[in-house]
Every structure is written in C-alpha cells, then in structure tokens.
C-alpha cells in the first residue's frame, strides 16, 4: 500500500510539474523576465561540485556508498538509453514550429 501511494504521489507530482510549468514560464516572460540557459562552464562546475559532495558522503557512510554506486550504474545505463531515444526526440520536437 505504501509503495502504491508513493508511486501515485510521484506520478501526480510529475504530471502537475509538466502541466503547470509552461503557463508559469509564459507568465514570467510576460512579466519581463529574460531567460537564459546556464552556460556550459556553470553546468560543469555544478556537476563537479555535486560529485565531490557525493564522494565526501560516500567516504564516511558505507550505506550511502553502496546505494550511490548502484544508482550511478543505473544512471549510466539510463543515460545511454535517453541519449538515443528521448534526447533525439526532444531535439526533433524543439526544432518543430508547433
């Protein structure tokens, strides 16, 4: 029951996130907000900093180290899949004039 409740909550949260963000983005832009993507050096620095934090935690917490290692293996495989499926489709859709 708990697992089903967690799955339901996650699904509802993601659906609301996806449904509400376009309207929120339009509202911000209409209010004068200028949008910029993070530059690659900022993304690189943030990624490195996060990896350093994970390594620090893993160095002192064996349970985290095990879970994190398993998650990183999963993420590598998932990233491979997304690179050739979701990312290609996303790039295609972003190029469309909808």
Image (cartoon, helix red, strand yellow):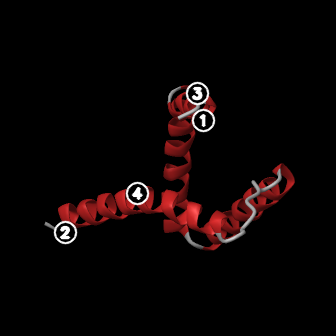
Whichever of labels 2 and 4 marks the residue nearer the N terminus, that label is 2
**In the visual, does 19 lie left or right of 26?**
left
Task: Place residue 35 in its image quadrant.
Answer: bottom right
Q: Secondary structure at mark 1?
A: helix
Find disc 2 in the rendering and name its residue.
2
The numbered disc on residue 3 is none
The numbered disc on residue 94 is 1
The residue under the point 62% across, 66% down is 58
Q: Are marks 1 and 3 in contact (CB under 8 Å)?
A: yes
Q: Considering depth in this image, is 83 or 66 the residue closer to the camera?
A: 83
Q: Secondary structure at mark 3?
A: helix
Above or below, 15 against 78 in this view is below
Q: Are marks 1 and 4 in contact (CB under 8 Å)?
A: no
Mark 3 vs mark 2, CA separation in Å = 38 Å
**Count of residue discs:** 4
Whichever of labels 4 and 3 marks the residue nearer the N terminus, that label is 4
Q: Are marks 3 and 2 in contact (CB under 8 Å)?
A: no
Q: Are marks 4 and 3 in contact (CB under 8 Å)?
A: no
The residue under the point 83% across, 53% down is 39
Find disc 3 in the rendering and name its residue.
92
Mark 2 vs mark 1, CA separation in Å = 38 Å
Task: Place residue 88 in its image quadrant.
Answer: top right
Mark 1 vs mark 4, CA separation in Å = 17 Å
């Amino acid at each position: 029951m708990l697992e089903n409740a967690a799955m339901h909550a996650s699904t509802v949260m993601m659906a609301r996130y996806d449904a509400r963000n376009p309207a929120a983005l339009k509202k911000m832009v209409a209010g004068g907000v200028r949008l910029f993507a993070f530059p690659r050096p900022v993304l690189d620095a943030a990624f490195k900093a996060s990896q350093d934090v994970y390594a620090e935690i893993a160095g002192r917490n064996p349970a985290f180290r095990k879970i994190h290692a398993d998650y990183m293996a999963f993420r590598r495989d998932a990233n491979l899949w997304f690179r050739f499926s979701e990312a290609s489709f996303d790039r295609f859709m972003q190029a469309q004039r909808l």
